[in-house]
Amino acid sequence: MMVSYIAFKALQVEEDGLYSPVEGTRWDIAYVPALGRMTYALRAPSLEGKGGIYGATYREAKKYLFKGCCLFLVAPSPDPDTETELGTHGWRTTCAIVIGKAAPMREAARLVLASHQAGYPQVEGILAWARAFTQRPPWTAEKVRRVLAHHAPRLGVAKVFDKWVVFDESIGLAQSGRRCGKRPRDVLAEVLEYHEAMELGVIDHHE
């Protein structure tokens, strides 16, 4: 599933599909041969003015994580009729496709790097983020405490019966192991990865 110019985008998740959070445009369900499966896609008439669908770096996309939104990986459609304008921090295109949810961030970073190594060009700033994220040191108990303490104002964590239950408004994550079918420890790891990615976005020299 290698793709060129993988980027991040915040999308509103509703029962009937995905919507752009700012314009409220509903994304269509379409078959994408390059992915070999059905996914969501959105077309724009042209790139005239500020037209087009935008894909951006992690740091930029998270600014649009309004209530009910999730981060997704997107890319310009490989359709030859697609017109795309590239930048160091993202792109805008006449047709974008959804690759999948961005979480877990570790897998998103690996996909960007694997696609780049396979010869698929990537956005400079996003490639730099992926390299930084995959080269980070492993988690330690001290690092977990430090990150939780740093993000305490917007991250609610409770220990219930020796298991973690995590709530984070910025990514709409309010789960326990019983509710989401995951071990609470894995849920906590997802939240920590999210906030570590924000930290990397802050120090990324391309940003």
Image (spheres, grey):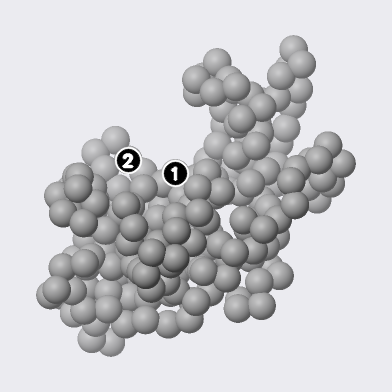
Percent across and percent down for residue 79 are 16, 68
Percent across and percent down for residue 186 are 61, 30
User: Marks 1 and 2, Cα distance to the nearest angstrom?
Assistant: 8 Å
Tell me: residue 193, above or below residue 74. above
Question: Quick check: can you spot residue 107?
Answer: yes
Residue 191 figure quarter: top right
Amino acid type, mark 2: Glu
Residue bearing the label numbered 1: 68
Along the viewing direction, whichever of 132 and 19 lies nearer the viewer = 132
Along the viewing direction, whichever of 48 and 84 lies nearer the viewer = 84
Q: How many labels does the image show?
A: 2
- Taking the view exactly as shown, the residue that stands out farthest to the top is 161
Q: Which residue is drawn at 50% across and 20% down?
A: 181
Q: Which residue is drawn at 66% across and 34% down?
A: 188
Question: Quick check: can you spot residue 148?
Answer: no
- Which quadrant: the C terminus? bottom right
User: How many other residues sit within 10 Å of disc 2, few (<14), some (14-19) or many (≥20)?
Assistant: few
Percent across and percent down for residue 13 are 36, 43
Relative to 182, is 4 on the left or the right? left
Relative to 197, is 16 on the left or the right? left
Percent across and percent down for residue 56 are 45, 69
Amino acid type, mark 1: Gly
Q: Which residue is drawn at 54% across and 49% down?
A: 105
Mark 1–mark 2 CB contact (< 8 Å): yes
**Label 1 or label 2, whichever comes before in sequence order:** 2
Q: Is mark 2 on a helix, strand or loop?
A: strand
Q: What element carries label 1?
A: loop
Tell me: residue 90, above or below residue 156. below
Residue 83 figure quarter: bottom left
Tell me: residue 138, above or below residue 43. above
**Residue 14 tag number:** 2
